[in-house]
Amino acid sequence: MSNIIAVDDILDATKLIKRILERKGHKIFPFTEEEEAIAFVEKNEVDLAILDIKLKKMSGVEVLEELKKRSPSIRVIILTGYPTIETARECLRLGADEYCVKPIDKDELEDKVQQILST
């Protein structure tokens, strides 16, 4: 189906996303290091990035900007445990397709991924 990267500073969070979405037939590439995820997108075709807002060295917003520079057509879902209207607006302005609040709801994630990839 689709190639998806999951970027979170917590490995278990990327494993959870991988487990949920692989059941739907997607190929998931988990990353805990922002630079590795960005380098992967430079060399591989990726349909969707699922980014946590709080990462190790960069913010999810900064990673979003870098990914869009390298792959303007990449679709993006931002995850956050600290939702604010300002952050949501900034992410959407920079090209994120969706904004989800943690903890991740399996059905919500599946639905949003399906909606984004079918448009």
Image: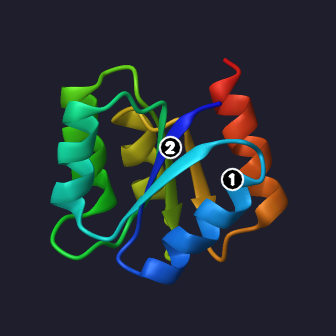
Among the two numbered marks 2 and 1 on one chain, the one whose residue lies closer to the N terminus: 2
Q: Nearer the viewer, residue 100 or 86?
A: 100
2 versus 16 height, above or below: above
| Residue type at tag 1 | Leu
> Could you classify mark 2 by the number of other residues whose Cα lies within 10 Å: few (under 14), some (14-19), or many (20 or more)?
many
Place residue 53 in its image quadrant: bottom left
Residue at the image point whose x is 62% and y is 72% from the top = 16
Residue 47 seen by the camera: yes
Image position, residue 102 (x, y; %): 61, 73
Image position, residue 5 (x, y; %): 44, 49
Image position, residue 84 (x, y; %): 49, 65
| Left or right of residue 37, residue 48 in this image | right
| Left or right of residue 64, residue 29 in this image | right
> Could you classify mark 1 by the number of other residues whose Cα lies within 10 Å: few (under 14), some (14-19), or many (20 or more)?
many
Q: Secondary structure at mark 2?
A: strand
- Residue bearing the label numbered 2: 4
Q: Secondary structure at mark 1?
A: helix
- Residue bearing the label numbered 1: 21
**Alpha-carbon span between mark 2 and mark 1:** 9 Å
| Residue type at tag 2 | Ile
Q: Badges 2 and 1: C-beta atoms under 8 Å apart? A: yes
